[in-house]
Amino acid sequence: MLKNISETAAIPRALTRFIILVASLESTTLSVAIPILNLNMLNLEKQH
């Protein structure tokens, strides 16, 4: 019985860890992508 409880308790913990990982990856992607997008916008404006 105790074994089942600890197993079900591990599932939300693993989910939380996964969500945190995804969120940190997304924020890293955004912090890289936004400056690149800004540079592209500046280049487009210079061409016109």
Image (spheres, helix red, strand yellow):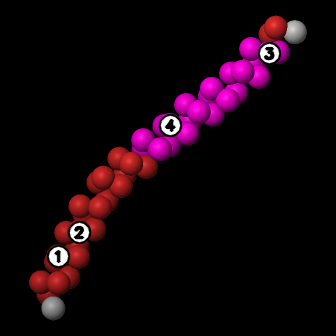
- Cα distance, mark 2 to mark 1? 6 Å
- Cα distance, mark 3 to mark 1? 56 Å
The label shown at residue 42 is 1
Q: Which residue is identified by label 2?
A: 38
Residue 2: x and y in percent read 82, 8
Counting other residues with Cα less than 10 Å from the Cα at mark 3, is it few (<14), some (14-19), or many (20 or more)?
few
Secondary structure of the residue carrying tag 1 is: helix
Secondary structure of the residue carrying tag 2 is: helix
Residue 42: x and y in percent read 17, 76
Q: Which residue is identified by label 3?
A: 5
Rendering quarter of residue 43: bottom left
Secondary structure of the residue carrying tag 3 is: helix
Q: Nearer the viewer, mark 2 or mark 3?
A: 3
Labels 2 and 1 touching (C-beta < 8 A):
yes
Query: Across the whole image, how many numbered discs are drawn on residues?
Result: 4
Secondary structure of the residue carrying tag 4 is: helix
Is residue 19 rendered to the left or right of residue 27? right
- Cα distance, mark 1 to mark 4? 33 Å
